[in-house]
Image (cartoon, rainbow, N blue to C red):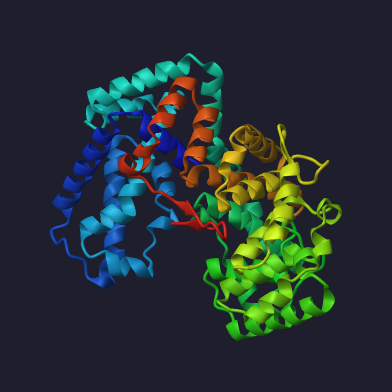
């Protein structure tokens, strides 16, 4: 997910990249034709054919020179799972290859090309790719010229090298901590158990590593201990997510069956408590209300307009500067997210007041969590998302946010210990740093591509990218993940 923008930049900059895409497509289609005699796939054989196809592709890539363990990890990507829609749109072996495997395949090759540009153990494989025709002479010349250009700017080369090694560093940290992470499922305190697993699971799934971990204990816990986790907790924040939401999120993503009627009954009781306890839940219990709305969406529980109004109504006094200045930047954005989520009307003045307060937190050093507070990855993510949601990304064009984000990732990975005693603040900051990178990569607008190009590459490359942004849609054949403008969720 953090390479998508980088691949877009390469696809814009390299005039001969189409030669690579075309040859790769022809090469693997020929391999598939030689092994699969029947092109039509019965619906009940889709998964079986997918697994056979993956094994065939992996075997061929190992022959080419790719590392078997690395390929094993890549092909655990949940993108390769068969979902309900696939049964409707995939009918032949080549449609299966084109829609499920080819986009991921291009990414694996492109990662090695990027490694070559910054001298990360790619030379032998690049020679193999050249010998086998994947990299024709015209493209080799372009890549060599690009590599030489990057070499002239050692600082940029080091920034690019550091950026592309983020994923590797996280995977190494997770591998070292695998037993500790899986043992968190056995913690006795439901709050620690679910909140920690929820946050770690979000980070793991960000890099599509879910299948490398054994979540059987937590699945069993969620299934058999609903009384313990279907509760709300005091002092809910984005760093301290509500317990019932953690349970629901993990249940749905780990495919644990739950009593939906019981959950809906609980949520409606929570609604009644919220309107009784707070004068303005939207302002006085923002994060708790946010998790409530996210949970109703997960359960497909649609509230009436009257119920929604009861939850989001607030006296104008709550939107005065003296009140808003005491709220966290992320909380301010969450209020705006809730407005969008419920399609609120007649709140223009409230939105204007919130935006004005958010913009007070934007400084040359980064995005602050309070007016006079500290720069925060959480605040950075929410302000980025806010401007994406409002089509106002130009407001961020002069802020060098990527440098702070990458530095925080390395710092937090260095000191974070995946254990029962780990710091929630560090874990949350790491999560929001990755989420920020997702926005830079998956929001394929000119503003975000330029941010990445300016941060990662020399000026000559930036200028060419700026002048050819329209090529993104026509050249790139890898996955183009998107971000939902209302929820912030990744769209595959």
Q: Residue at the spot x=43%, y=53% of the render? A: 77
The quarter of the displayed image where residue 16 is located: top left
The percent position of residue 430, horizontal first and vertical second, equals 66, 45
- Front residue of 4/191: it is 4
Q: From where the camera sits, is residue 100 visible?
A: yes
Position of residue 256 in the picture relative to residue 46 (left or right)? right
Q: Is residue 459 left or right of residue 358?
A: left
Q: Nearer the viewer, residue 298 or 185?
A: 298
Q: Is residue 461 above or below residue 468?
A: above
Q: Quadrant of residue 395?
A: top right
Q: Quadrant of the C terminus?
A: bottom left
Report x, y in % for residue 174.
59, 47
User: Which residue lies at the image location 14% right of the left edge and 62% below the top edge?
Assistant: 38
Q: Nearer the viewer, residue 293 or 69?
A: 293
Q: Residue at x 31, y 39 (%)?
A: 475
**Residue 464 locus on image (x, y percent):** 40, 26
């Amino acid at each position: 997910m953090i390479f998508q923008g980088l691949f877009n930049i390469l696809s814009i900059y390299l005039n001969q990249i189409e030669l690579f895409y075309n040859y790769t497509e022809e090469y693997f289609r020929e391999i598939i034709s030689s092994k699969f005699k029947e092109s039509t796939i019965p619906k009940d054989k889709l998964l079986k054919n997918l697994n056979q196809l993956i094994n065939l592709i992996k075997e061929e890539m190992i022959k080419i020179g790719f590392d078997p363990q690395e390929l094993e990890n890549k092909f655990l990507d949940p993108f390769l799972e068969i979902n309900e829609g696939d049964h409707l749109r995939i009918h032949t072996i080549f449609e299966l290859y084109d829609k499920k495997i080819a986009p991921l395949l291009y990414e694996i090759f492109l990662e090695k090309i990027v490694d070559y540009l910054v001298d990360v153990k790619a030379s032998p494989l690049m020679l193999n790719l050249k010998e086998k025709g994947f990299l024709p002479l015209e493209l080799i010349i372009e890549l060599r010229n690009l590599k030489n250009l990057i070499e002239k700017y050692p600082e940029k080369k080091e920034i690019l090298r550091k950026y592309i090694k983020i994923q590797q560093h996280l995977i190494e940290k997770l591998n070292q901590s695998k037993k500790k992470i899986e043992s968190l499922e056995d913690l006795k305190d439901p709050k620690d158990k679910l909140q920690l697993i929820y946050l770690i699971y979000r980070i793991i799934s960000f890099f599509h590593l879910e299948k490398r971990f054994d979540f059987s204990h937590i699945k069993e816990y969620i299934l058999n201990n609903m009384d313990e986790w279907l509760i709300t907790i005091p002092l809910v924040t984005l760093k301290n997510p509500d317990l019932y939401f953690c349970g629901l999120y993990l249940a749905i993503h780990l495919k644990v069956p739950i009593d939906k009627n019981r959950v809906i009954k609980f949520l409606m009781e929570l609604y009644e408590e919220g309107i009784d306890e707070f004068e303005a839940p939207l302002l006085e219990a923002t994060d708790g209300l946010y998790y409530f709305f996210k949970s109703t969406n997960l359960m497909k529980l649609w509230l009436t307009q009257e119920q929604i109004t009861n939850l989001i109504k607030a006296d104008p006094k709550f939107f005065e500067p003296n009140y808003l200045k005491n709220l966290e930047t992320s909380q301010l954005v969450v209020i705006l997210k809730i407005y969008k989520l419920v399609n609120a009307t007649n709140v223009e003045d409230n939105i204007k007041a919130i935006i004005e307060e958010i913009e007070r937190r934007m400084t040359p050093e980064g995005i602050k969590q309070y007016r006079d507070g500290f720069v925060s990855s959480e605040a950075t993510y929410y302000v980025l998302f806010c401007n994406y949601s409002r089509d106002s990304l130009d407001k961020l064009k002069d802020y060098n946010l990527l440098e702070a984000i990458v530095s925080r990732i390395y710092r937090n990975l260095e000191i974070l210990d995946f254990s029962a005693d780990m710091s929630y603040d560090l874990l949350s900051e790491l999560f929001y740093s990755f989420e920020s990178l997702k926005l830079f990569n998956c929001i394929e607008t000119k503003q975000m591509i330029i941010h990445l190009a300016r941060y990662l590459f020399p000026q000559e490359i930036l200028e060419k990218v700026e002048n050819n942004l329209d090529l993104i849609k026509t050249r790139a054949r890898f996955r183009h993940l998107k971000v939902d403008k209302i929820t912030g969720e990744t769209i595959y």
